Each structure stands twice: as structure tokens, then as C-alpha cells.
């Protein structure tokens, strides 16, 4: 049986108008705008919709003063060359969205829904996707220290060219999740890996991790 690859996002190539810091506020509908070279620390963008927008070289704030993107919606939008010490985007919705060249300290994005999303050339310390629903998501050429997919529903997700240090999936439901090439030093939730694909080399490398997780003694 062949593992299905994620279906790529589709973004509009239209030239956006200039967007400004004052445009962003709670429950705003922002359409066809480009936000460039902005500091969004402490900005309240709860339940804001970014439709066909571009965010370039944006600072989403430090750990003490992050932007609040709770319940935000991104559709047809790209985020490029940006950074966030803490990215607070719980219960958000990402559809046909690309995030590239971006540095995230802690991505607090649990209970979110991502569909047709590309994360490329990003450096992520911790990505909390607990309880989220991911469909057609690709992490390409990323370095991720820890990803938490506990209780998530994950379908057609892959990690080509990426590295992951710790992979958590306790209670997750996986389908067509391509883990080939990953060499995490820790896997939590081995019993929830049904629906994932690994290669022969990984099977040998993970043998000790699997045995420890399942309580098997190898003598």
C-alpha cells in the first residue's frame, strides 16, 4: 500500500496592497494585504482573519509579550522570514497557507485545524499541536526540537528533509503520516503510530525506543 503524500496549498499570486500595524485588531477581516517589517508584540489579533495576505520579516513578539492569535484564521496566506519567541495561536485555522524561513521558539497552537499547509526551512524549538486536526501538511527541510501531537488527528502529513528531536503522539489518530527519514531520540506514544510509515533503517534504529516504550526487555 502506497502512502499518500500531502496535497499542496494553493495561494493567489496577486500583488497585495500595503498593510499597516493599525489594520490589525480583534475579529478584523484583512484581505489582500502585505504586512512587512513589523513588530507585532502584544498585538491583539484574536479571531482575526488573514485572507490572501503576506507577512514578511514580521516579529510576532518575545516570550513576555507575544501577539495573541487565538482563534485566528489564515487562508491563502504566506508567512516568510519571520520570528516568534512564543507564537500563541491556539484554536486557529490554517488553510492553503505557507510558512517559510521562520524561527519559532514555542509554537502554542493546540486545538487548531490545519489543512493544505506547507512549513518549509523553519527552525522550531517546540510545536504544541495537541488535540489539533492536521490534513495535507508538509514540514519540508525544517529543524524541530520537539513536536507534540498528543490526541491529534493527523492525515497525509510528511517531513521530507526535516529533523525532529522528540516526537509525541499519545492518543493520536494517524493516517498516511510519512515519518521516513526522521531519527528522533525520543518517541512517546509508540502504540499510537498505527497509520504511520517508516523505512527499514528506521525500524532498526527505533527498535530500542519501541522496546522501552512497550516495556519489553531485550537481553
Image (cartoon, rainbow, N blue to C red):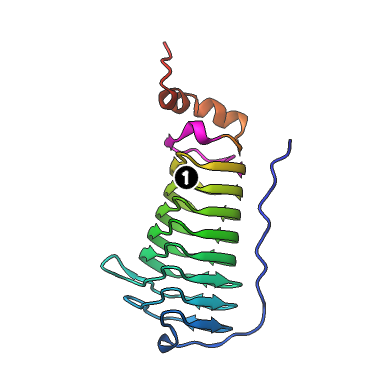
Residue 184 magenta-drawn? yes
Q: Taking 38 as reference, is 29 left or right? A: right
Residue at the left extreme?
Answer: 64
Rendered location of residue 62, percent (x, y): 30, 68
Q: Quadrant of the N terminus?
A: top right
Residue at the top extreme?
Answer: 219
Rendered location of residue 208, percent (x, y): 45, 24
Say which residue appears at 38% left-offset and 65% top-offset. 88
Task: Reply above or below: 210 against 157.
Answer: above
Q: Quadrant of the C terminus?
A: top left
Task: Reply above or below: 14 against 79.
Answer: below
Question: Which residues are the magenta region?
Answer: 176-193
Q: Nearer the viewer, residue 114 or 100?
A: 114
Residue at the right extreme?
Answer: 1
Q: Which residue is mark 1?
A: 151
Q: Nearer the viewer, residue 122 or 128?
A: 128
Give the total of numbered labels: 1
Rendered location of residue 72, percent (x, y): 47, 71
Q: Taking 44 as reference, is 30 left or right? A: right
Q: Quadrant of residue 199?
A: top right
Label 1 environment density (alpha carbons within 10 Å; few <14, some 14–19, many ≥20): many
Confirm whether residue 159 shows in the render: no
Where disc 1 sits, the SS reads loop
Q: Nearer the viewer, residue 100 or 22?
A: 22
Rendered location of residue 132, percent (x, y): 49, 53
Task: Reply above or below: 217 against 107.
Answer: above
Task: Reply above or below: 83 against 110.
Answer: below
Say which residue appears at 48% left-offset and 65% top-offset. 92
Residue 30 magenta-drawn? no
Confirm whether residue 162 shows in the render: yes
Amino acid at each position: 500500500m502506497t502512502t499518500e503524500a500531502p496535497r499542496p496549498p494553493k495561494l493567489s499570486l496577486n500583488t497585495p496592497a500595503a498593510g499597516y500595524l493599525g489594520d490589525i485588531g480583534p475579529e478584523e477581516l484583512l484581505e489582500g494585504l502585505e504586512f512587512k517589517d513589523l513588530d507585532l508584540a502584544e498585538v491583539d489579533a484574536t479571531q482575526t482573519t488573514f485572507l490572501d495576505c503576506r507577512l514578511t520579516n514580521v516579529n510576532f513578539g518575545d516570550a513576555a509579550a507575544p501577539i495573541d492569535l487565538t482563534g485566528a484564521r489564515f487562508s491563502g496566506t504566506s508567512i516568510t522570514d519571520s520570528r516568534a519567541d512564543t507564537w500563541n495561536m491556539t484554536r486557529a485555522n490554517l488553510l492553503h497557507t505557507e510558512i517559510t524561513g521562520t524561527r519559532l521558539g514555542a509554537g502554542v497552537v493546540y486545538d487548531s485545524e490545519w489543512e493544505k499547509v506547507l512549513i518549509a526551512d523553519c527552525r522550531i524549538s517546540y510545536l504544541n499541536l495537541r488535540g489539533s486536526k492536521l490534513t495535507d501538511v508538509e514540514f519540508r527541510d525544517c529543524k524541530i526540537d520537539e513536536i507534540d501531537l498528543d490526541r491529534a488527528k493527523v492525515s497525509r502529513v510528511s517531513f521530507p528533509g526535516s529533523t525532529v528531536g522528540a516526537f509525541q503522539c499519545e492518543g493520536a489518530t494517524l493516517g498516511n503520516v510519512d515519518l521516513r527519514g526522521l531519527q528522533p531520540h525520543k518517541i512517546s506514544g509508540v502504540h499510537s503510530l498505527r497509520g504511520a510509515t517508516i523505512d527499514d533503517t528506521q525500524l532498526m534504529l527505533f527498535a530500542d525506543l519501541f522496546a522501552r516504550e512497550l516495556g519489553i526487555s531485550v537481553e
